[in-house]
Amino acid sequence: MVGKPLIIYIENDFGTESYNNFRDALIAVLEKDCDCAIANFPYTQRMKDDEAKVKQAIRYGSVILFIVAQDEYDESEHEQAIAYFRFLAPNAPIVVIPNGRENTYTANLADRTIKAMRHTDPELISYVKYLRSEWMRNASWLRPGSSIERQLIADQLVSTHRTNNPGDSSFGESDDNERTVAEALRVRLLGSELTGIEFDNTLDRTKADFPIIENEIYRAELERFRHLSAPELAVIDAFLQVSVGAGGGHGICVPSVCGFAIDPVTQEINITHGSGNHRVAAQILSQRLEVMGILRRESLADEVRYSWRLVQGRIVSNAPGFSTPFLMLYQQHTDDEVFKNTGIFLQSKRQFIPVSSYAKLLE
């Protein structure tokens, strides 16, 4: 069950590039500022492949908006998407994002549920916030659509309550109705991460390239790194330096190395993959922050100034004796305290072991 209103968004990467800053910036603002979940598909056909999940989300009343960007190379793609949206949800709101060659989108605007807005249009954010407020006003957090589904969820709540409370004595519940209410309250009061363990968070936008590591394993690896002897630390340092192209690496990263950039202010992160792309992680993130600033009506929308506050690095996997990837960060012009806090924040993410360019643990 999706705990947030859901936006279905169709837009692909830029041409042959593996990123799309306008799309990614818009998604970041929709997720953070509008508190919405985003299901992003590159094409209509990819969405059709997940039709069962999409229909389930619509049936539960989770979908508040469909967005499709006009494809620069396929002029019929957005029309196909609109037709498919209408097949799934005849009255749902739709936003069409015009491509760069057109100032406006005119087709289908006779339909008042279709609007044309650009990636950088702050009115799009205002519109989504309005749709979300309407969804919150009308929605119950428990949204089964039929009597069978309501009974199924009630039975599951009772079963879960009995599993979690074998003595059935916490609140002195006397029957299944009270057990249902008690378990519903417990789940409602849990944080979203815990709720996701027990309920199906459908239509995740993407799977993480670097998954979150179990806390015990991650803490054990950190502790092992802290207690490395000088010769052992020298081995790790040499491995990292060669991997990123230093220390005998002739300036060339090994293929498995990924580029990394983080904005300490917004904690927005960008990771790049592929040969040569490790060098452009900060540039891509800077451009994304610029678009986010326009959407948020921030006075600062200067790519150069954004780039100055970013912390850059390289992700290196398969270091000897460690299953957790290392994240080598470069301080450059970053303040000492900001640099240290960035490392502490990245430790809390439990995806990498953050170290300085001299293999010193950031904490």
Image (cartoon, rainbow, N blue to C red):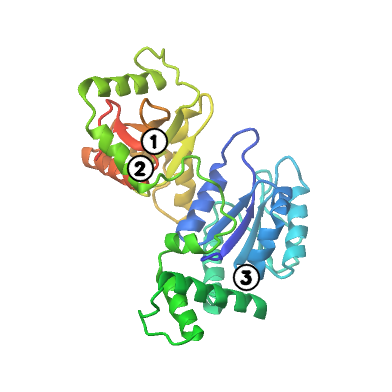
Which amino acid is tagged 2?
Ile
State the residue position of label 3. Answer: 60
Which amino acid is tagged 1?
Thr
Would you say the residues marked 2 and 1 are in contact, meaning their CB atoms lie under 8 Å apart?
Answer: yes
Where residue 62 appears, as percent x and y from the top left, is 59, 67
| Left or right, residue 107 beside residue 312 | right
Q: Which mark is residue 217?
A: 2
Q: Quadrant of residue 33?
A: bottom left
| Front disc: 3 or 1 | 1
Q: Residue at x 36, y 17 (%)?
A: 246
Disc with the residue nearer the chain's start (2 vs 1)? 2
Residue 154 versus residue 69: which sits nearer the camera?
154
- Element type at marker 1? loop
The CA distance from mark 3 to mark 2 is 37 Å
Where residue 172 appears, as percent x and y from the top left, is 37, 85
Is the residue marked by circle 3 packed among few (<14), some (14-19), or many (20+) residues within 10 Å? some
- Element type at marker 2? helix
The reply to whether residue 282 is in sight is yes
Q: Is residue 69 above or below residue 4?
A: above
Residue 70 versus residue 260: which sits nearer the camera?
260
Q: Is residue 183 above or below residue 216?
A: below
| Left or right, residue 32 beside residue 362 | right
Disc with the residue nearer the chain's start (3 vs 2)? 3
Would you say the residues marked 3 and 1 are in contact, meaning their CB atoms lie under 8 Å apart?
Answer: no
| Front disc: 2 or 1 | 2
The reply to whether residue 93 is in sight is no
Which amino acid is tagged 3?
Tyr
Q: Residue at x 24, y 38 (%)?
A: 335
Where residue 186 appears, as percent x and y from the top left, is 42, 73
Disc with the residue nearer the chain's start (3 vs 1)? 3
State the residue position of label 1. Answer: 324
